[in-house]
Image: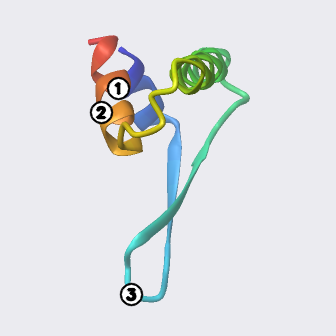
Amino acid sequence: MQANLLKKHQTFFYDEKGNPVMVQLDLRNRAVREAYEDWMDAKEAMARENDASRPFEEFVEEYMNSGE
């Protein structure tokens, strides 16, 4: 659910070579805003657990798949 919701309300920005460099989330959507806040809380919890060696991409993949 979270992954589909965020994908629906995101806009990617690309560099001159066509590589994605930034993503914008539409926080006017309440569900998107709540999902984003949950994501930030999970990331902060991970940092508190001293799991800083864990690759960020791994965290994102696990988080995005957790709601499906």
How crowded is the residue under tag 3: few (<14 C-alpha within 10 Å), some, or many (20+)?
Answer: few
Percent across and percent down for residue 15 are: 49, 80
The quadrant in which the C terminus is found is: top left
* Relative to 15, residue 43 above or below: above
Instruction: Specify the quadrant of the image occupied by residue 67.
Output: top left
Whole-number angstrom distance, CA of label 1 to CA of label 3: 27 Å
Percent across and percent down for residue 2 are: 41, 19
Q: Residue at x 38, y 74 (%)?
A: 19
Q: Residue at x 43, y 34 (%)?
A: 8
Percent across and percent down for residue 3 are: 36, 26
Numbered mark located on residue 61 in the image: 2
Q: What's the residue type where badge 2 is placed?
A: Glu
Q: Residue at x 54, y 23 (%)?
A: 39
How crowded is the residue under tag 2: few (<14 C-alpha within 10 Å), some, or many (20+)?
Answer: few
How crowded is the residue under tag 1: few (<14 C-alpha within 10 Å), some, or many (20+)?
Answer: some
The quadrant in which the N terminus is found is: top left
Is disc 2 placed on a helix, strand or loop? Answer: helix
Q: What's the residue type where badge 1 is placed?
A: Met
* Relative to 16, residue 4 above or below: above
Q: Tell me, yes or no, whether the two marked residues, 2 and 3, touch with CB atoms within 8 Å.
A: no
Is disc 3 placed on a helix, strand or loop? Answer: loop
Identify the residue position indicated by label 1 in the image. Answer: 64
Is disc 1 placed on a helix, strand or loop? Answer: helix
Q: Tell me, yes or no, whether the two marked residues, 1 and 2, touch with CB atoms within 8 Å.
A: yes
Identify the residue position indicated by label 3 in the image. Answer: 17
Give the mark, 1 or 3, whose residue is nearer the N terminus: 3
Whole-number angstrom distance, CA of label 2 to CA of label 3: 25 Å
25 left or right, relative to 61:
right
